[in-house]
Image: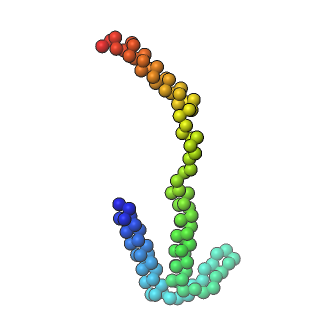
Amino acid sequence: MKSLTTLIISAILALWIMAIAILSVQNATPVTLKFLAYESIRLPVGVVLAFSAAAGAIVGAVIALPLFSSPSFTSNDFSPDDEETEDYQQKTSSGANDWMEKGSKDW
């Protein structure tokens, strides 16, 4: 299953690279990027697309990194000495004993 996922991701990435290459070869006109008061130098569309794709991949990886990282647990997080665990065990065991004493007489 892991190899299938890798194959699909590689195929999608290859298709995007091919699309950028075809578009940049067919449309080599220079463009300028304008943002507020800033204006870039004239660059071909393919170069702008390549930089945009690279920036998007980096930003996407940085955003997704905390989502796929494993949480760090300490050994004290799940200690069996917790008072809550003991209270829960006492409540459940006493409830079972009550049923055995009272409920079994009805059968």
Task: Name the quadrant of the C terminus.
Answer: top left
User: Which x, y percent locates residue 96?
Assistant: 42, 20
Which residue is rendered at x = 54% and y = 51% of the image?
Answer: 71
Which sits in the foreground, 18 or 39? 18
Q: How many marks?
A: 0
Left or right of 5? Residue 73 is right
Left or right of 38? Residue 75 is left
Which residue is rendered at x = 55% and y = 57% of the image?
Answer: 66
Does 103 appear above or below 20? above
From where the camera sits, is residue 67 visible?
no
Which sits in the foreground, 55 or 70? 70
Which residue is rendered at x = 48% and y = 84% of the image?
Answer: 24
> What colour scheme has been applied to the protein in the rendered image?
rainbow
Quadrant of the rendered structure where residue 2 is? Answer: bottom left
User: Which x, y percent locates residue 55?
Assistant: 56, 72
Q: Residue furthest left?
A: 107
User: Which x, y percent locates residue 91?
Assistant: 49, 23
User: Which x, y percent locates residue 15?
Assistant: 40, 75
Task: Name the quadrant of the N terminus.
Answer: bottom left
Which residue is rendered at x = 57% and y = 29% of the image?
Answer: 83
Q: Residue furthest top?
A: 105
From where the camera sits, is residue 71 visible?
yes
Quadrant of the rendered structure where residue 77 is? Answer: top right
Does 100 appear above or below 14? above
Does 35 appear above or below 76? below
